[in-house]
Amino acid sequence: MPATQAGAGAADASALLSVASAGALLRASGLPVTGVEVTYVRLKPGQSALVGYLVEGTGPNGEPVSVPGYVRVSTPARARELVSKWRRMRPTPSPLGEGVRLLDDDRSVLFLFPNDAALPGLRFASSMQKLKRILSQLEAVAPPGQNVRARGSFLTPVRYKPERRFIAGARLRIRGDTTAQAEERSVFLRFFPDARGATIARTAAALRGGRSPVPVPVPLGTAMEGRLFVEEAVVGEEIMPAVLVGRAEAPGIVEALRRLHGSHALLPARRSPRDLLASLEAGWGAIDWIHPGAAARVRPFIERLGRAVPTGVRCRPIHGDLHLHQMLTGPDGPVFVDLERAAMGDPLQDLGGLVAHLLVLGDERPDERAKVRAFQDEVTDSYLRHVPRRDREDLRFFVGAALLERALLPYRQGREDRKERGPGILALTSSVLAARPARPKPTAEAPRSPTRSPVFFSRPDPRVPRLPGYRWEVFYPRRAALWPGYAENPRGAKAYGVYDREMDEFRAVAFAEDPVLGSLASWFGRGDLVAYRVGRRATIRVEAEGHAPTRFVKLLAPRKARALADRTRVFERVARDAGEHFPVFATLLGAHVERGVLEFAGLPGVSLNDLLISGRFEDGGSAAVVGRALAALHSAPTPATGLPAISAPIELAE
């Protein structure tokens, strides 16, 4: 199919990666460009390509200017539609002219900072004049009666990935309306296209709470519906310079890792070794679209990793993207920064990411290799002393996966030396995996050991009351996640929490500490808890006053709340056009998806479960009603949009 019909072709994407071709296209489109540097690449094979640039040119008064931006290439129809939409939104002008424009090839759209198709609020998040009002509303930044002043405050961009994130450091000048004395403080800002900022805030709060706080930056709050996250700036230096000169202190690093991995925090996201492998396969598959043969060189390593995926369950809080740049040495020791990928996962993933970075660093810096290797060995040996012997071999999997991830970086950054850097990292990967025996497949003679059953928590969380006759229950156990559940005694007293299969222990989780359902605690005293799964969802029955109907409040992660609200509205449309006997669905009374709160009207009647238990279902009439309702539901016209297809089964623990 021609590229003009199917989407962006490989030739279109490759041309954008060429500095000469990109510069020529921009000049042909009327921009006063003198130079172009590729900074970021994201590919969707056969659909679109996005390439970030630092564009150098001449300003309106003839002065030299440098502006970040990016080009998105797709179909001509999609490109024209995108430009038309943005012109109605009045894009912010740039020193190089229009902030958004259709380029001369009729299929590429140029966005110049702060215009961004997926970060429409970036012009607010990148301007101190506009940002001061937003930050002044956060009490942890500016106490009541004080405000952030634009004069004397400075914003320094740190990193910008088009349509993904904008990160900046800020030096704020804060002063009260009636005082002349001003206070200064340093913060870090992270701006996303979705409510990821709110997730990071909950993650940081969970890690800093508890009996052994994890060293992470202090969260100061979120704004713009959770898209903007503000944290205290960390006073410290990156660890890498100290590693290169032999001054890095391995014991402090290992202790910080042990505090992170030993934390009782329950984080919102989950990461498994297979998630890691799937991400690698997708990343290299996209690169192969415009660099044919790149994936073929990597495929044998991915296949080897696929045969060596760890099968043990180690589900603890992890950083998720740990390398030397993600740890700073502060006055009180190492501090973990950038918690965007923090999740519940295998702790060896963090150690593997750190070791992979050290291996590449030692390979690229031969003069400092001995110091780097000495630090690497000390960290690895010290950490693994606390890891069961049977699990230590799994470190090779995570080091190999992290090395393949690092081999992707030169392609994603559009570096001109990307083809030269790859072979060295692949050679390191080969040496790491060389001694790794493949895991034997289960046979009839040697069946795989079954999953260990709970022995009902020989080392219980001290917050769980030890009342006699407790019954324990967990829901939908998964291989690579903690199991939500509860403990209940004969008197009906419940303790909600999670079961850690690896440690064979139950951890109680207070309602106010739920990592996903941040507003859960605020609903108590306003209704009755009907159902609750820690970190997943909760349902609360709210009895209205007078003759008003009962409401049911459902609390979910914001992303899932949005999906449920959308699906409910689809069913409302279907019900309006449906025939007789179509089932009645609960009416959506209110949706606050940014907080994960949905309110439904209560339905009259008795649940099918209660009918069955009471024996009243046996009269036959109820069965006929249920049958007709199901038939009407399944024969209703299929909506054009709004309902996703279920294509994969839930992966349950075996």
Image (cartoon, rainbow, N blue to C red):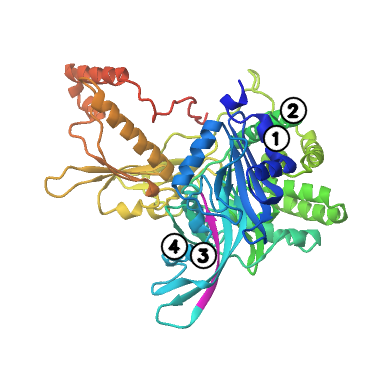
Of pointers 4 and 1, the one earlier in the residue sequence: 1
Up-down relation of residue 632 to residue 182 (above or below): above
Residue located beneath label 4 in the image = 134
Identified by mark 2, the residue type is Ala
Question: Can you tell which of label 4 and label 1 is closer to the viewer?
Answer: 1
Q: Report if residue 369 is visible in the image.
A: yes
Which amino acid type corresponds to the residue marked 1 in the rendered image? Ser
Question: Would residue 385 be seen by someone viewing this image from the given angle?
Answer: no
Mark 1: give few (<14), some (14-19) or many (20+) Cα within 10 Å.
some
At label 4, the amino acid type is: Ile
Label 2 to label 1: alpha-carbon separation: 19 Å
Sequence-wise, the earlier of marks 2 and 1 is 1
Q: Nearer the viewer, mark 3 or mark 4?
A: 3
Q: Which residues are magenta?
A: 183-192
Quickly name the residue at label 3.
Answer: 128
**Camera-side mark, 2 or 3:** 3
Point out the tag, 2 or 4, that comes first from the N-terminus: 4
Label placed on residue 445: none
User: Earlier along the polypeptide chain: callout 3 or callout 4?
Assistant: 3
Per the image, label 3 sits on a secondary structure element best described as helix
Q: Main secondary structure of the magenta part?
A: strand
Q: Which residue is mark 2?
A: 296
Q: Is residue 184 magenta?
A: yes
Along the viewing direction, whichever of 190 and 520 lies nearer the viewer:
190
Give the secondary structure at mark 2.
helix
Nearer-N-terminus badge (2/3): 3
Residue 145 spot, x, y in % from top left: 39, 74
